[in-house]
Amino acid sequence: MKEASSPDEERRRHPRHELLAQVRVSRGREDIVMEMINISRSGALIDMGSVDQPRWVDIGRVLEFSVTHPISFEVVEIRGRIVRIFKDENATHFA
């Protein structure tokens, strides 16, 4: 018997892989360091921690990130569109 999956898992096109990588976003005078907590071929989940959500973190916004590989420390430049934002008691997250 197959276990029931969550609605989020059913919508995902690609499996997610847990990791902890440093992400840096620079916008004008703001330079925010965040954590990427999972990634797939089609997206990633970013944890902003306790930083107040800047106005430019908005659904539909395209951001350019510098991601530091957690093992090699190589810095990779990527671009992504924010499709979801949610908050919990500890942090703001976006995907």
Image (tube, rainbow, N blue to C red):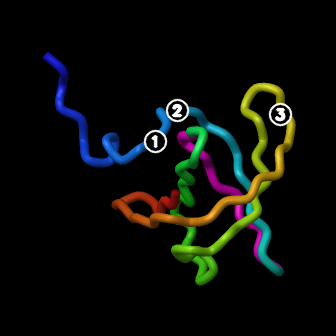
For marks 3 and 2, give the CA distance. 17 Å
Whole-percent x, y for residue 26 in the image:
79, 68
The amino acid sitting under disc 3 is Phe
Please tell me whether residue 59 belongs to the stretch shown in magenta.
Answer: no
Please tell me whether residue 31 belongs to the stretch shown in magenta.
Answer: yes
Q: From the image, give the main secondary structure of the stretch colored magenta.
A: strand
Q: Which circle marks residue 18 in the picture?
A: 2
Of badges 1 and 2, the one in the foreground is 1
Query: Residue reaching furthest left?
Result: 1
Residue ID for mark 3: 73
Whole-percent x, y for residue 15 in the image:
47, 33
Whole-percent x, y for residue 20 in the image:
61, 37
Labels 1 and 3: the sequence-earlier one: 1
Residue ID for mark 1: 13
Split into 4 quadrants, where in the image is the N terminus?
top left
Residue 4 lies, with reference to residue 47, above or below; the image says: above
Residue 57 lies, with reference to residue 89, above or below; the image says: below
Labels 3 and 2: the sequence-earlier one: 2
Residues shaded magenta: 29-39
Whole-percent x, y for residue 95 in the image:
52, 57
Labels 1 and 2: the sequence-earlier one: 1
Query: Residue reaching furthest front?
Result: 13
